[in-house]
Amino acid sequence: MSEPGTLRPAPVDPPSPATPSSIVLLHLWRNRTPRGRFEAGKDLTESGMVRSLGLPVSELRRILSRLELEGNLTHRLQYVVGYTEMKTVYHLTRRGEHEARQLEGRSGEDRAGR
């Protein structure tokens, strides 16, 4: 019980739970390859995302397909660090970068508020 005349902190809304799509967008944002770089990192491949995010392959493929249809990401064959052959690599489009920056800002606010 609080003392009379003391202020109680205002209730804080719990952060909205992260959706699988937002988790993938943030992962691609945080692991993006600098423009013009020849090789991509392993975390931008499907197998790298499965390892890093712990999502089942089928769910990840569904998410990647939906994000691509929405215009948030694109894929291409590219050399990947540690592999001799080219792999399919996923990159954010400008729209996807915008979405990811907004999500990154919100996750930063959530961390600061804790």
Image (spheres, rainbow, N blue to C red):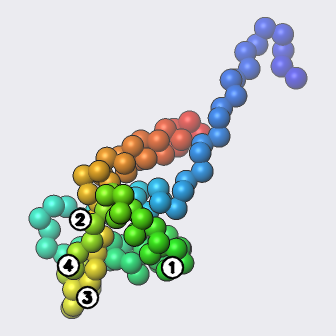
> Can you identify the residue that label 1 sits on?
58
- Determine the CA span between mark 2 and mark 4: 11 Å
Task: State left or right for residue 92 relative to residue 47.
Answer: left
Looking at the image, do the residues carrying marks 3 and 1 touch, with CB atoms under 8 Å apart? no
Secondary structure beneath label 1 = helix
**Callout 4 crowding tier (Cα within 10 Å): few <14, some 14–19, many ≥20:** some
Upstream in the sequence, badge 2 or badge 1? 2
> Can you identify the residue that label 3 sits on?
83
Upstream in the sequence, badge 3 or badge 1? 1
Give the residue type at disc 2. Thr
Quarter of the image holding residue 92? bottom left
- Determine the CA span between mark 3 and mark 1: 23 Å
Please say if 54 is above or below 22: below
The residue sitting at 14% across, 68% down in the picture is: 37
The residue sitting at 20% across, 78% down in the picture is: 78
The image shows residue 100 at horizontal and vertical percentages of 37, 51
Q: Is residue 30 visible?
A: no
**Residue 21: mark:** none
Give the residue type at disc 1. Ser
Specify the quadrant that holds the N terminus.
top right
The image shows residue 34 at horizontal and vertical percentages of 19, 61
> Can you identify the residue that label 2 sits on?
33
Give the residue type at disc 4. Gln
Upstream in the sequence, badge 2 or badge 3? 2
Upstream in the sequence, badge 3 or badge 4? 4
The image shows residue 39 at horizontal and vertical percentages of 19, 75
> Can you identify the residue that label 4 sits on?
78
